[in-house]
């Protein structure tokens, strides 16, 4: 996961929380095509074959991604985890 950019880490974190491409695009303020490109890059960089495999790996590594100080979602109170899973879910 070290080879991922900060933005790719954000996308992967939210992907592991179960968000679809449309939700990711809305949450991150980017076009759907950009989200799909990020996901394709992430899948390749982390050595997986599918988006689902990347999401599972993200869920398993959630604490690593969430605790990474370069992840801007970590710095925001009430981040996506609260909106999608309820307070304290992360």
Image: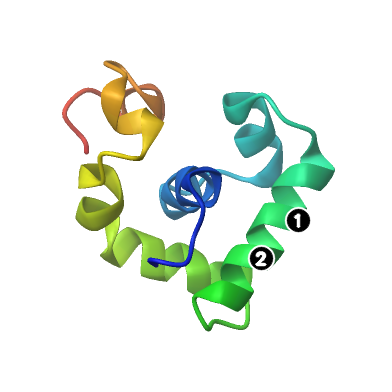
x, y (%) of residue 46? 49, 76
Taking the view exactly as shown, the residue that stands out farthest to the left is 88
Quick one: 66 or 70, which is closer to the camera? Answer: 70
**Which residue is at 68% across, 33% downward?**
25
Q: Quadrant of the N terminus?
A: bottom left
Tally the marks.
Answer: 2
Residue denoted by label 1:
37
Label 2–label 1 contact, CB within 8 A: yes
In this rendering, does residue 75 appear at all? yes
C-alpha separation, residue under disc 2 versus residue under disc 1: 6 Å
Indicate whether 1 appears above or below 10.
Answer: below
| Image quadrant in which the C terminus is located | top left
Q: Residue at x 77, y 44 (%)?
A: 34
Most distant residue in the right direction: 33
**Mark 2 neighbour class, 10 Å CA radius: few under 14, some 14 to 19, many 20 or more:** few
Please indicate whether residue 29 sits to the left or right of residue 37 in the image: left
Crowd tier of the residue under label 1, counting other residues whose Cα lies within 10 Å: few below 14, some 14–19, many 20 or above: few
Which percent across, then down, holds residue 50? 62, 76
Q: Is residue 70 left or right of residue 90?
A: right
Residue 57 - label: none
Say what secondary structure mark 1 lies in. Answer: helix
Which quadrant would residue 42 be assigned to in this image? bottom right
Residue 44: horizontal and vertical position, in percent?
62, 76
Q: Is residue 60 above or below residue 71?
A: below
Question: With respect to residue 85, does 61 lie above or below?
Answer: below
- Is 69 located above or below residue 49 in the figure? above
Q: Quick one: 69 or 74, which is closer to the camera?
A: 69
Q: x and y percent of residue 18 in the render?
A: 48, 49
- Seen at 34% across and 40% down, the residue is 70
Q: Which residue is mark 2?
A: 41
Would you say residue 85 is visible in this rendering? Answer: no
The kind of secondary structure element at disc 2 is: helix
């Amino acid at each position: 996961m070290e080879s991922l950019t900060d933005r790719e880490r954000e996308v992967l974190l939210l992907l592991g929380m179960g968000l679809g491409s449309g939700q990711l695009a809305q949450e991150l303020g980017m076009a759907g095509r950009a989200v799909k490109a990020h996901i394709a890059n992430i899948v390749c960089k982390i050595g997986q074959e599918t988006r689902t495999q990347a999401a599972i790996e993200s869920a398993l590594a959630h604490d690593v991604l969430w605790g990474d100080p370069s992840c801007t979602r970590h710095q925001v109170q009430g981040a996506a985890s609260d909106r999608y899973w309820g307070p304290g879910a992360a």
